[in-house]
């Protein structure tokens, strides 16, 4: 289970990183102006930092689940 969680978290982290880079690049050339969806108070502001925070969360989750799987493998030996 930990291996699957690690793999899924890693790839979601990669997707978040790519989205952050694309949105940052579009923002730099002026095509995409942030914040997105801030037209009313009920919407959440979306920025490249949101994607980077998500990427860090998923990468830390992947590292933690890999460490858990490694520790369980060491215990069974």
Image (spheres, grey):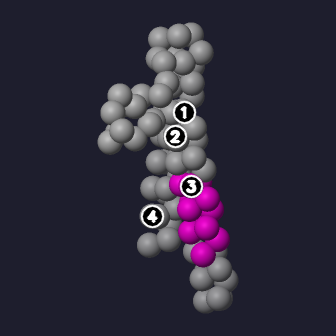
Considering depth in this image, is 67 or 30 the residue closer to the camera? 30
Q: Real-space Cα distance between discs 3 and 1?
A: 14 Å
**Is residue 41 in view from this perspective?**
yes
Mark 3 vs mark 1: give the one in front: 1
Mark 3 → mark 4, Cα distance in angstroms? 16 Å
Report which residue position mark 4 lands on: 4
| Residue located beneath label 3 in the image | 57
Residue hosting label 1:
48
Image x and y of residue 11, in percent: 49, 48
Q: Position of residue 30 (x, y in %)?
A: 53, 10
Crowdedness of circle 3 by 10 Å Cα count: few (<14), some, many (20+)?
some
Which quadrant is the C terminus positioned in?
A: bottom right
Q: Secondary structure at mark 3?
A: helix
Residue 51 badge: 2
Determine whether 3 is above or below 59 in the image: below
Would you say the residues marked 2 and 1 are in contact, meaning their CB atoms lie under 8 Å apart? yes
Residue 14 in sight from this viewpoint: no
Q: Secondary structure at mark 4?
A: helix
**In the rendered image, the vertical position of residue 75 relative to residue 19, given as above or below:** below
Kindly identify the residue that appears in the image at 60 percent across and 50 percent down.
56
**Start-end of magenta stretch:** 57-68
Location of the N terminus by quadrant is bottom left
Residue shown at 57% from the left, 60% from the top: 62
């Amino acid at each position: 289970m930990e291996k699957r969680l690690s793999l899924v978290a890693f790839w979601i982290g990669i997707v978040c990183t790519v989205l952050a880079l694309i949105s940052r690049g579009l923002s730099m050339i002026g095509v995409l102006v942030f914040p997105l969806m801030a037209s009313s108070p009920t919407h959440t502001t979306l920025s490249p930092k949101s994607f980077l925070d998500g990427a860090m969360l998923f990468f830390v989750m992947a590292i933690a689940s890999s460490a858990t799987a490694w520790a369980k493998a060491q215990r069974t030996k």
